[in-house]
Image (tube, helix red, strand yellow):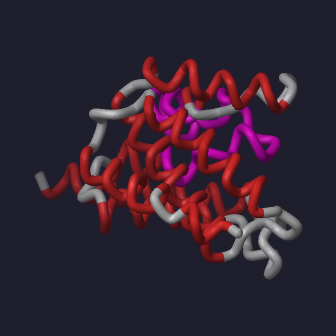
């Protein structure tokens, strides 16, 4: 058992270092232009410390979840470094940037119910972190209406993953209830 835990921890640290390198120089859209790597780290934090999720595969996918979508990383590269399972989970939560934004958003809603259980956990953590960021440090220039639209859309996405983790879903619902703070 201890060998499996050490191996999982080792793989997680490698994934975190990989994500940090890939997202090096990227910034979030908040006024402070926070380092982008804070976002994948926040997902892992939510999963472990608020969701009690200790599955190394899920945690690796969480810290790598935006590497294909937002960097030059390829699915083959992720598979070589972290295996087909982790690369597959990342691909499940990756938007196709070749599509128009509205279509990408619609696809997230329609595909959510069909995600693997691991990808559903990553999706939940991602939306929790995004709602928290919008409440605490929203993207520069976002109006109250745009913030509310994001919350409404995120709720549609999460509707498709319901049943994956009641505790994380409750966290999401608590954040969703704070829409009055978005003005």
**Where is residue 53 drawn, in percent x and y?**
28, 53
Left or right position of 180 against 43: right
Depth check, front residue: 177 or 69: 177
Q: Residue at x 78, y 71 (%)?
A: 30
Instruction: Please determine whether, in this image, residue 54 is positioned above or below residue 65.
Output: below
Instruction: Please determine whether, in this image, residue 27 is positioned above or below residue 95.
Output: below
Farthest bottom residue in view: 32
Q: Magenta residues?
A: 61-90
**Where is residue 52 drawn, in percent x and y?**
24, 58
Q: Residue at x 14, y 58 (%)?
A: 2
Q: Residue at x 50, y 26 (%)?
A: 112
Depth check, front residue: 13 or 105: 105
**Residue 146 visible at all:** yes
The quarter of the picture where the C terminus appears is bottom right
Depth check, front residue: 29 or 174: 174
- The answer to if 58 sits in the magenta stretch is no
- The answer to if 73 sits in the magenta stretch is yes
Q: Residue at x 69, y 75 (%)?
A: 137
**Where is residue 28 drawn, in percent x and y?**
76, 66
Instruction: Please determine whether, in this image, residue 21 is positioned above or below residue 127.
Output: below
Depth check, front residue: 127 or 10: 127
Left or right position of 179 against 172: right
């Amino acid at each position: 058992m201890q060998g499996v835990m050490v191996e999982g921890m080792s793989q997680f640290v490698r994934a975190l270092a990989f994500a940090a390198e890939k997202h090096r120089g990227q910034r979030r859209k908040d006024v402070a232009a926070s380092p982008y790597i804070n976002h994948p780290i926040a997902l892992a934090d939510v999963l472990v410390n608020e969701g009690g999720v200790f599955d190394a595969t899920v945690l690796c996918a969480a810290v790598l979840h935006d590497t294909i979508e937002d960097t030059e990383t390829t699915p083959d590269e992720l598979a070589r470094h972290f295996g087909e399972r982790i690369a597959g989970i990342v691909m499940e939560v990756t938007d196709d940037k070749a599509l128009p934004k509205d279509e990408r958003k619609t696809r997230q809603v329609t595909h959510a119910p069909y995600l693997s259980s691991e990808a559903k956990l990553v999706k939940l953590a991602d939306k929790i972190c995004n709602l928290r960021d919008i409440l605490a440090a929203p993207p520069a220039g976002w109006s109250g209406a745009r913030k509310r639209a994001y919350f409404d859309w995120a709720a549609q996405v999460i509707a498709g993953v319901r049943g994956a983790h009641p505790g994380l879903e409750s966290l999401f619902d608590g954040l969703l209830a704070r829409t009055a703070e978005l003005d």
